[in-house]
Image: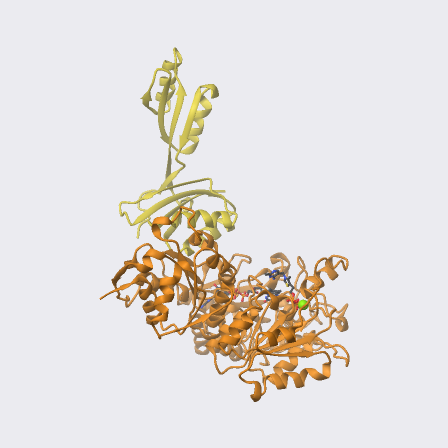
Chain colours: A yellow, B orange
Amino acid sequence: MRHILSILIENEAGALSRVTGLFSARGYNIDSLTVQTTEDVTMSRMTIVTHGSDDIIEQITKQLNKLVEVVKVIDLNEADHIERELMLIKVRATGKERDEMKRMADIFRGRIIDVTEKSYTIELTGPGEKLDAFIKALDPAVILETVRTGASGIGRGERILKI
Amino acid sequence: MEISGAEIVTRCLQEEGVEFVFGYPGGAVLEIYDAIHKQDFFKHVLVRHEQAAVHAADAYSRSSNKVGVALLTSGPGATNGITGIATAYMDSIPLIVISGQVGTPMIGSDAFQEVDMVGCSRPIVKHNFLVKDVRDIAATFKKAFHIATTGRPGPVVIDIPKDVTIHKTKFEYPQSVSIRSYNPPVKGHPGQIKKAAQLLADAKRPFVYVGGGAVLGNASAEVTELVKLLNLPCTNTLMGLGALDGTDANFVGMLGMHGTYEANLAMQYCDVLIAIGARFDDRVISVPNQFLSQAKKIVHIDIDPSSIAKRVKVDVPIVGDVKSVVSDLVALLKETGQRPNDKALAAWWDQVNEWRKPNSLLYTQDSEIIKPQFVVQKLWEVTDGQAIVTSDVGQHQMFAAQYYKFRRPRQWINSGGLGTMGFGLPAAMGAQMANPYAQVACITGEASIQMNIQELSTCKQYHIPVKIINLNNRYLGMVRQWQEFFYGNRYSESYMDALPDFVKLAEAYGHIGMKIEKPADVEPALREAFSEKLKDRLVFLDFITDQKANVFPMVQNGKGLNQMDLPEHMRGMQQVPFENNRDYGNLC
Ligand SMILES: Cc1cc2nc3c(=O)[nH]c(=O)nc-3n(C[C@H](O)[C@H](O)[C@H](O)COP(=O)(O)OP(=O)(O)OC[C@H]3O[C@@H](n4cnc5c(N)ncnc54)[C@H](O)[C@@H]3O)c2cc1C
Ligand SMILES: Cc1ncc(C[n+]2csc(CCOP(=O)(O)OP(=O)(O)O)c2C)c(N)n1
Ligand SMILES: [Mg+2]
């Protein structure tokens, strides 16, 4: 099953490689990984999307907790949570395609953030499936380039990951 | 006053009470070596290969519960240390490894003798540091010693670029250390301990399985008290040997791949298992499904949550330090008077004793060819069971584990998790340094000993009087055994051809060598080697042993603990409870 793990980790050189090294050394999967410092710059927050049986997810969580620099780990799937992902997608937009493309972006609540004579770059956020749906809705031939951040997740309501 | 980074390194080691540093110099650590030259707080031991420095420091830790320290230069020095670090990591040994690094401005430029040591060692350390600022050295050492020795112990690498050892700053060693992301547990949950006591009280066939964690956590006394209080049968893993006295009536021998008949069957057929600082290794329980095919309730005490439910689901996990948890459990049992039903326990002991009867470690010594088991048994007699024994990897290691009945923890020093050939001799050096008055024996094989034979020179320089017990079967015996069992007697590359004359070799290094070829000469040779006269000398005893000896019992890969290959006199014997209709419950 797919799980989203949220990790608070010391913002230190090499900390990221300890996490990714752990996944590869133990044969766990990383579907996506995002990381940035938090409001407290000594700490980073990482979101890792992974999949595996309950036993494996339990081991992953324990192994992550064992890393000296990891402050806290939660499995967001254990309760209500929200996840979002950002995609930037550059599409061919010439002639009558331009209107068509603009309409598509609107339907998906995307924003056009860069315009040239031949292309649009569209910014789109949402759960991963929405981004997938957008890509599917387009003719593959018009897609010039896509870049996605992977999911970021947060617990709903009072569920807070902090030290 | 400002002092150099190199001097700070030596001062940190002094603050930590370090007595010995095992190392080897090179360009990147010359400043540190210069600082070592100017101090006399600790002694430096110059090994002949960096792998040996790390093994020696590791065994220094294992045999004393102090922290071993190794010092390596950058590049090849550091990578030579990798096997040693991995060895310590697999067995959870606290260790500090200091490696030199090229100067900070050069890092990443493929500089001479540059290796990304933090990257290379990352998967095999508890933690590691690259110190980029001289002002961080002291705090880093404080943290490193703290991390290495607390929680589940492990090796910590401190990589120090050369320029950082030259820069100067004021030295102040932190009094205390707190790392917000690192808080290992100590006390076990009282509710869980209650559940464990209840399970024991309800048990008909209780069994105690004690691992390296009881040695690492200095909990031998507590474990022994638990076993004695309830009169429970108890086994030790290879890493736990000595946690319960090997001559104790409650001890049923080691379990696992080469465990005794009684230990393996008790493990398989018990109904309540108390696992203490043991990690259900594949060489212990073989296949989890086979192991769990007889229903049992399991209590698992371990300081590392990731050891729990890793291979086997358990009923009562208790995260905490063995010493604390077991003494809480004992206190509770005493308070409540809970204990297993006497009649059931007596019947269970009858069963265990019946399993003991055929003696799965029986061998026969004829008058012609020396049996390796015989040498170990004689060594035990000659040393009164009191020697510190180190070992390499192979059949000789298993014979040592089976036939030397270890009396106390930290007496048996071997590489269990990684199985590193070449460990034995440097380990003996480290153990002897930590225990200058103890008798130290290294039980090895003619192949393993050659993997770090150069350390005979270190032993000469520092007058390290260890006794080397070479069980010379002219084979990679353990490999040969597998080839005999599983590869149709095709002994591919397992014969050690062109062996050196070990007597001459020992003499060339300035030691005493003896070659022993007849069973009758085994004991006299050992007596001489351990005599008062040779107390200060390293003696290399080259025992020419039976080439065809195999280690029994053996649980083959994929088989259950009740599907052992048994020694000849037990072939075909049933591996079930002898009587199924006892009033202590249905076993199968
Ligand atoms: C040739 C060969 C054959 C082998 N055959 C066998 C065999 O027949 N039988 C056998 O037993 N082994 C055998 N081994 C060794 C095997 O590979 C493992 O190394 C060994 O079984 C592991 O021992 P352990 O379970 O005691 O765990 P260890 O590796 O000693 O681990 C200790 C456990 O205790 C925990 N711990 C540490 N400190 C504390 C503390 N203070 N409080 C609580 N918990 C703590 C740790 O988290 C860890 O889970 C063999 C090895 C070789 C090389
Ligand atoms: C560094 C290393 N290389 C290879 C092995 C695989 N191995 C395990 S036992 C063994 C044979 C050891 O031979 P010897 O030291 O003579 O001991 P014996 O089994 O004959 O007693 C080998 C090659 C190992 N454990 N370690
Ligand atoms: Mg051999």
Residue A158 percent location from the top left of the image: 31, 46
Residue B432 percent location from the top left of the image: 50, 77
Q: Nearer the viewer, residue B481 or B136?
A: B136
- Residue at the farthest bottom position: B532
Q: How many marks?
A: 0
- Residue at the farthest top position: A95
Task: Residue at 65% x, 66% y: name it.
Answer: B587
Up/down of B409 relative to B147, above or below: below
The image quadrant that residue B413 belongs to is bottom right
Quadrant position of the C terminus of chain B in the picture = bottom right
Q: Nearer the viewer, residue B78 or B545?
A: B78
* Left or right of B459 in this view: B525: right
Task: Residue at 46% x, 24% y: name it.
Answer: A136
Up/down of A84 relative to B475, above or below: above
Instruction: Inspect this view and state whether residue B344 appears.
Output: no
Residue B50 percent location from the top left of the image: 49, 63
Q: Indicate the quadrant of ligand 2 in the picture.
A: bottom right
Task: Residue at 54% x, 64% y: name it.
Answer: B298
